[in-house]
Image (cartoon, rainbow, N blue to C red):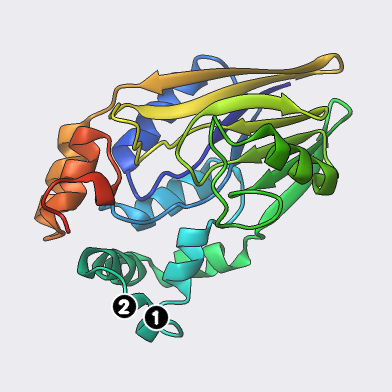
Amino acid sequence: MKVLLLGDVHANLPALEAVLAHAARRRPEAIWNVGDFVGYGAFPDEVVKRLRDADAVSIVGNYDLKVLELRKRQKKLRKKRAEKWLAFKWAYESLSKKSRKFLRSLPQEVRLEAEGWRVLITHASPASNEEHLWPDTPARRLRELAAVADADAVLCGHSHQAFARKVAGVWFINAGSVGRPDDGDPRASYAMLSITRRGIRTTHYRVAYDVARAVAAIREAGLPEAFAEMLLQGRALDAIEGSG
């Protein structure tokens, strides 16, 4: 079974389109999406529609939840940096009612079986939808998570860092970020999983996309220039010089 694993699109439609086109040549039988459809990019509604139309098995990410809960959590979210508050607000207002309803319908995790392997699809970690798992997360922590995961493979995102590590007999696989890489490489990131009875093989890809189109849309929407620089530099907001 071939599976396209992606996540953390963050409203970057050009990056998503490039990933889907690149992956299509590898003929995946399924698309598994670890969440965070929206945030910072200029195409939140379009990204939701595109993944819904692609019949992706999707979960809701922590950023998606914060956007959906904007009205309930305005006081708390307003305490964040001005750019971050604007990103939440703009994403919420730019989603159609149908897309908001779709996102609200999604679970925070999905469990399924593929070729005899028990798979957990979660946004961040089996313990929390805001815990970052990194390529260098201590093996001790992964062993703790493996003990509670009740799965043979944990597919996650959130940290925007691609890796595949096997600890205590459990695979931890992160596809990296489609739409908001923050490792200094602006190219979109995703993974292809080859799942057989014998095992799970992961291949990570980086894909060039039309960054200029994504940046132009951010500027046309009147969003902060720092959001454009995030895509140009492949960096997180806090790493953009002069964005604080």
Q: Secondary structure at mark 2?
A: loop
User: Of the numbered discs in the image, which one, if any, rests on residue 180?
Assistant: none
Q: Residue at x 40, y 21 (%)?
A: 206
Characterize the local packing of mark 2: few (<14), some (14-19) or many (20 or more) Cα atoms within 10 angstroms: few
Taking 149 as reference, is 195 above or below it? above
Name the one closer to the observer, 31 or 76.
76
Judge from the rendering whether residue 4 lies leftward or rightward of residue 40; answer left or right: right
Name the one closer to the observer, 91 or 201.
201
Disc 2 marks a residue whose amino acid type is Lys
Characterize the local packing of mark 1: few (<14), some (14-19) or many (20 or more) Cα atoms within 10 angstroms: few
Circle 1 residue = 76
Rendered image quadrant of residue 139 = top right
Given contact means CB atoms under 8 Å apart, are the residues at marks 1 and 2 in contact? yes
User: Of the numbered discs in the image, which one, if any, rests on residue 79?
Assistant: 2
Judge from the rendering whether residue 42 lies leftward or rightward of residue 182; answer left or right: left
Query: Quadrant of the image for the N terminus?
Result: top right
Q: Position of residue 154 (x, y in %)?
A: 71, 38
Taking 175 as reference, is 88 above or below it? below
Q: Position of residue 20 (x, y in %)?
A: 45, 29
Query: Quadrant of the image for the C terminus?
Result: bottom left
Judge from the rendering whether residue 186 lies leftward or rightward of residue 244; answer left or right: right
Q: Position of residue 109 (x, y in %)?
A: 69, 54
Q: Residue at x 27, y 34 (%)?
A: 234
> Could you tell me how far apart the alpha carbons at marks 1 and 2 are, in whole angstroms?
6 Å
Disc 1 marks a residue whose amino acid type is Lys
Q: Residue at x 80, y 46 (%)?
A: 149
Q: Secondary structure at mark 1?
A: helix
Q: Position of residue 241 (x, y in %)?
A: 14, 46
